[in-house]
Image (tube, rainbow, N blue to C red):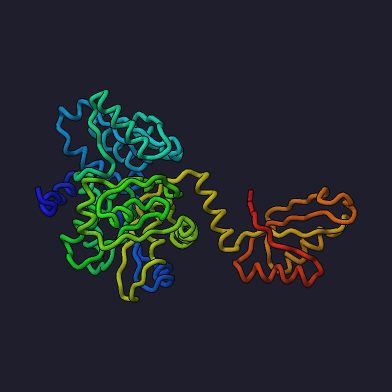
Amino acid sequence: MAVHEALSPERFAAAREAIAPAIQATPLVSSPHFSRLYGCRVYLKPENLQRTGSYKIRGASARVALLSEEEASHGLITASAGNHAQGLAYAGRARDIDVTIVMPEATPLVKVNNTLAYGAHVILHGATFDDACAEALRLADEGGQVFVHPFDDLDVACGQGTMVYEILEELPETDVILVPVGGGGLATGVAVLAKQLKPDIRVIGVEPSGAASLAASLRAGHPITLPQLDTIADGVAVKHPGERLFPYLERCLDGVVTVPDDRLVPVFLDMLEQHKLLVENAGLLSLAALRELEFSEDTCVVAVLSGGNMDVITLSSLIQHGLIARNRIFTFSVLLPDKPGELERVAHVVASARGNIIRLDHNQFVSINRHAAVELKVTLEAFGPEHRSEIMQRLREAGFEAHVTLSTSIY
């Protein structure tokens, strides 16, 4: 079957109908903040608010809906970093099908627990998705279960692409859709259907620079395997893009942008503060890519927020790093004579500059002669880089030789 025939409009329409009972339409969110920041009209497609917390329920439900009763009787098995796992577990439970998920050992606990809560069996194996996938395929051969690939499956890709119907029905003037890319299932479904419904629309994939397997494959002209992965965006940490999907990605994507991990941190903070939305690192790629692209002010851009399943430890770490990166949390050190009143003097200067102290470390053993000098480290909250500079200037004017330290922790 030719590439353009395999993912036909009829196939997408059938997928939309099949998954309707399992999903909810996620309405677009206009973002005045990101629109001002990047000089175009930015809308968010918040699939982090989808059932199971990500778009993956779309593709999993489409695949499960097409299973024959005989196939379903054997049970299902897959590999997943978490979001496909939850989607398949949810869809399998709806048809009372036994589901086994193989997940990388470093999968965030929230994704493991949520998958278990949907009734699936979970096996933790390997350091990466590719390790888990190899094990799932081995178990499928051994046990006879139906293997449902998390991305390299045309039915799954069709299901993922159904969000395009919602985007274009709500915002027909959409010019560009930005989609995170891991193995390419979402990018394939979105790019193919978007071009069918609106041929002049642009679809751009976004990968973390530490896991840019699709960008490397497009340069090579065929799917290649990365030697290693290095990214905090665990949901798209895939060494090799989908073999079945690659021809569609080559033909229908209008480009791939790579984003370094450190660009995700400030976007994460903005999403929490400006939109009250919790989005996982992989889901932030589409927004982070706006910094790498240039659009006119009337260009209508939809950024797909692919998921929001994040464990609380990662959440707290990102908040801390985001505040530090923006100089809203910083630490300074100062040497003081060990006598009464010195700590109070420092606190008074900080308070007069409207700084908010959140942590003090007082080290009397920094010098052999502790009566001559003790070290005080102060961690405080500021409004940003200008406010930080103001506080440090006030300390110097008060006679303190204070220095900003490189390491900061609010815990």
Q: Position of residue 301 (x, y in %)?
A: 31, 66
Instruction: Name the residue: 27% across, 49% down.
Output: 223
How many numbered marks are there? 0
- Camera-nearest residue between 275 and 88: 88
Apparent side of residue 253 relative to residue 406 in the rendered image (left or right): left
Apparent side of residue 73 relative to residue 321 in the rendered image (left or right): left
Q: Position of residue 214 (x, y in %)?
A: 31, 53
Q: Position of residue 69 (x, y in %)?
A: 15, 29
Q: Is residue 252 above or below residue 155?
A: below
Instruction: Name the residue: 81% across, 63% down.
Output: 345
Instruction: Name the residue: 14% across, 47% down.
Output: 14
Q: Is residue 173 above or below residue 130?
A: below
- Camera-nearest residue between 59 and 335: 335
Residue at the extreme front of the image, as rendered: 220
Q: Quadrant of residue 136?
A: top left
Q: Position of residue 357 (x, y in %)?
A: 69, 58
